[in-house]
Amino acid sequence: MAFSSSSSLIALALLLSLSVCSVTSTSKFDELFQPYWAADHFSFDGDAVNMKLDNFSGAGFSSKSKYMFGKVNVQIKLVEGDSAGTVTAFYMSSDGPKHHEFDFEFLGNTTGEPYIVQTNVYVNGVGNREQRLNLWFDPTKDFHIYSILWNQRQVVFLVDETPIRVHSNLEHKGIPFPKDQAMGVYSSIWNADDWATQGGRVKTDWTHAPFVASYRSFEINGCECPVSTADSDNAKRCASSGGWWDQPILSELNVHQSHQLIWVRANHMIYDYCSDSGRFPSVPVECEHHRH
């Protein structure tokens, strides 16, 4: 690619430096996370962590710290074979009834059918912003990188560094944006056969249990927030820290990323709440302004 000016070269250098900053050296599971549900449903295979669902219990883990802005990466290999009725979730969330939350939910399916990836965004306790897509690969055959980038301008969901969803800051339109609450990082596997597969028509076949999701290469690079510090103070500190996540180059997708997102939406999206007139007779206000 040719650049016609010194400013373009500077922008490229900044982009490269940010890409280095945004990918920290991977950490072992117990350096960043801890089981918070069904510790006996975890097993360890080298640097990989396996978490299982059986007809007794699911399982879950949480980060030891909370964060305000930054990027979270984890590699996941999803449940192989007949995973109908199961949900493997990877998400960020704050606490309380008016919490913020950014969700990846992987909805299992019968053997041979594609996994569905559902994303959702909660702001001040209100969700109902689901999007669903089929992936362009089989997520049960190998590990793939799932990431959430969060700054004061946007929330970006990425799969192998390809953006699949953007939630932009539209506060100038009077629409709340999640930037005032520290969030933990979580994952869980659980039975949701009342809704997860074909609207709940296909139930979990427990003869295929245990259902196992595997994780490795844990990375969190963000503004860490002490539990003893008020959210308002954490928000002020993290917003003014000059962190890599708030560099202008990350305030929106670049041209290549925008093209990737258009491709994902055109070829792999199967549901968008913005287009669901049955649920929303009036188009949700943020849908009128989002460019993606």
Image (cartoon, rainbow, N blue to C red):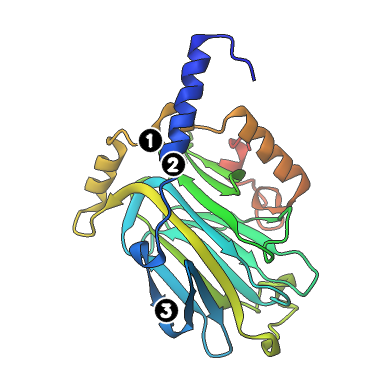
Is residue 98 rendered to the left or right of residue 8? left
Q: Position of residue 209 (x, y in %)?
A: 64, 86
Is 35 situated above or below 275?
Answer: below
Tell me the amino acid under the disc marked 3.
Trp
Label 3 or label 1, whichever lies nearer to me, is: 1
Quadrant of the frame with the N terminus = top right
How many residues crowd around disc 2 within 10 Å: few (fewer than 14), some, or many (20 or more)?
A: many
What residue is pinned by disc 3? Answer: 37
Residue 40 or residue 240, whichever sits in front: 40
Residues at badges 1 and 2 in contact (C-beta under 8 Å)? yes
Q: Which mark is residue 22?
A: 2
Q: Which secondary structure lies at badge 1?
A: helix
Circle 1 sits on which residue?
244
Q: On the image, which quarter does residue 286 sit in?
A: top right
What label does residue 118 carry, if any? none
Q: 40 or 263: nearer the eye?
A: 40
Local secondary structure at mark 3: strand
Q: What percent of the width, then of the height, locates residue 228?
A: 19, 59
Q: Nearer the viewer, mark 3 or mark 2?
A: 2
Q: Mark 3 or mark 1, which has the lower sequence index?
A: 3
- For numbered disc 2, what is the local secondary structure? helix
Q: Does residue 86 appear in the picture of this structure?
A: yes
Q: Position of residue 148 (x, y in %)?
A: 50, 50
Examine the rendered structure and indicate whether residue 262 appears above or below residue 91.
above
How far across and down, in percent of the image, does residue 92 sit?
Answer: 44, 58
